[in-house]
Amino acid sequence: MSDETPNSVTMQKDGEVAVIIVNNPPVNALSWHVREGLKTHFEAALADDGVKAIVLRCDGATFIAGADISEFGKPPRGPDFNAVLNMIEAAPKPVVAAIHGTALGGGLETALVCHYRIAVPSAKLGVPEVKLGLLPGAGGTQRLPRVVGVEAAATMTSLGDPVPAPKAKEMGLVDELAGEDSLAADAIAFARARIADGPRPTREREVFGDVAAIEQLKTANAKRWRGFEAPYANLACVEAATRLPFDEGLAFERQEFMKLMMGSQSAAQRHIFFAERQAAKIDGLPKDIKLRDVKKVGIIGAGTMGGGIMMNFLQKGIPCTIVEMQQEALDRGLGVVRKNYDASAAKGRFKPEQVESMMGLITPSLELEALADCDLIIEAVYENMDVKKEIFGKLDKIAKPGAILASNTSYLDVNEIAASTSRPGDVLGMHFFSPANVMKLLEVVRGDKTADDVLATAMATGKKIGKVAVVAGVCHGFIGNRMLAPRQIEAQKLLLEGATPAQVDKVHVDFGMPMGPFQMSDLAGVDIGWHRDPNRIESIRDALCAEGRWGQKKQAGFYDYDDKRNPSESPRVAEIIEEFRQKAGVEKREISDQEIVERTLYPMVNEGALILEEGKAQRASDIDVVWIYGYGWPVYRGGPMFWAGLEGTDKIAAALEKHGFEVAPLLKEKAAAKAGF
């Protein structure tokens, strides 16, 4: 090893057992210097006649957790990973992997070339590469079917979920479980006992199991994998292991890996992996800022949103006081929470006693005064500025000093809400997405006067309750809903010009969205935000609402629905659209799918550029995180701003100009440079 190489791998001997130890904090990633250290020390141990067996283990919190993703796309450095693995597998002395923490991806592939595996019961083993749009590219798809069989290998590679060590032992992935606190000693003893058995190269073992399991997995996951390439590539590699000699299987795996690695889907999924972590960082705030304590939470409003928000806190053991105006509304809200938990318990997600424990953390009340001892109070009433200002004015007098006052508003001006208190520094927006107990996104809206520690505490609280939190500035609709608006406006215009709701929705679903604009409207409720005057008909939506076509809940919206909520195109909606078309004097014409993309998806990129220019999002990748986690944008397209780079900002700007949009200056700038965001 050269002088500048970090000393991340060392070796010590215990009699005739050499112990090679990786120490590359924080997760012992397979950086170039780790590969170099493994090569050097394995060569030394194999050349030493006094060494009869080798143990590979790691210091710190975990076994090798995987590849060093920061090296992706950079010129290769250090020894080739596959060459190091092949050397370990070909060792004429038994090699034992001693696993604690996680052995993931390249970490598990390293353990698979070892002849035996011992693990502590709390360890987890897996190949999560599929979640980054990749496959285990160092023999994982070829060695796993030889160790755990075709079905388990196909499941592990295509779904990417880790396996707990006790289950891994049942599967044959782990040979023995060590004591939780005695792995180092147990591994040496285990290795010593294997000297008589000798090495057991994985590549020489036979593939076993039923190849039919692969097709069954495809059928079972068809909906989940729609549009994704990586799950199918993983399965193709496992299938190849059943029919090709090992070296040919490796070559096939390499070919599939490179296809994915060079493709846009993996680039998009890796982008989101880093974007999610980046979103947690608040520009301009010190990392060591002191957070406020959040030990008790108050929720105002026991409707669908309020109850859903509360469930997040209950599941983390945080007591909640929930306030409603009427006893009936309070009882109904608590009943829904109980029903949700009971349904989860029936599926085995919670034990009945956990449900009782969570329900026991709730203090229901009809008085705002009950919130006096709460550290964080979240208002979740309907979108009406006057109502919200009245509530915050009252909270100002009730809440204890230092309590954080948050509004779950989707659109409204957080600064105006904050101005109704004498403590605007304690006020911000915490915009949860519905259903709030399921959806991962949390937009944390920073008011002009929001204190730094209040913002940092809200972000940290979001993380604690399992949300992906993103900072947004104050503007109508913040990040997500602001970008949704131009899409919805154009979708409505397209109906007048000749597209049908089904055509517009199909373009979005084919793109990878879970549903299109009109399906979404029917699901959420066409009447949301409607002025409620059936005689005031100014839009297609007004006409639908006036006839009681409020969406799925009424079995009629932009579509007709049967008793099982299956949609069909509606002749009545076609009539309403035709009436509006004639009134507006618009001539019906053929609308291409490409025009729908250009007029509904491109304007979102344009709005995103404006949001960045105005400083309402910290970074382009934050906008992508909002759309992935809040609106179901396909992760394999990386979010609207990342996708703009794939699509071509010059192409997007030109199409927007053609359709009469004003192109955002930042988008123009990117287009001129043919650059992404």
Image (tube, rainbow, N blue to C red):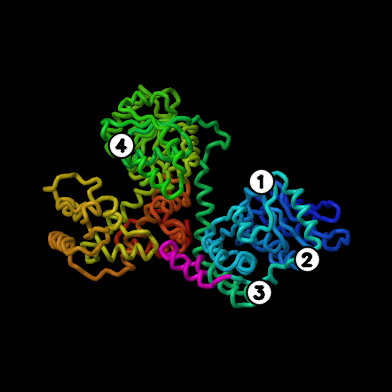
Q: Earlier in the sequence, mark 2 or mark 3?
A: 2
Position of 302 with respect to 472 (left or right) is left
Mark 2 is surrounded, within 10 Å at the Cα level, by few (under 14), some (14 to 19) or many (20 or more) other residues, namely many
Residue toward you, 667 or 235: 235
- List the residue tagged with mark 3: 246
Q: Quadrant of the N terminus?
A: bottom right
- Residue 91 is marked as 2
Q: What residue type is disc 4 on?
A: Val
Q: Are marks 4 and 3 in contact (CB under 8 Å)?
A: no
Q: Earlier in the sequence, mark 4 or mark 3?
A: 3
Q: CA distance from mark 1 to mark 3?
A: 34 Å
Q: Which residues are magenta?
A: 209-233
Position of 112 with respect to 132 (left or right) is right
Circle nearer the viewer, 2 or 4: 2
Q: Are marks 1 and 2 in contact (CB under 8 Å)?
A: no
Q: What residue type is disc 3 on?
A: Phe
Q: Position of residue 631 (x, y in %)?
A: 38, 53
- Residue 61 is marked as 1
- List the residue tagged with mark 4: 381
Q: Earlier in the sequence, mark 1 or mark 3?
A: 1
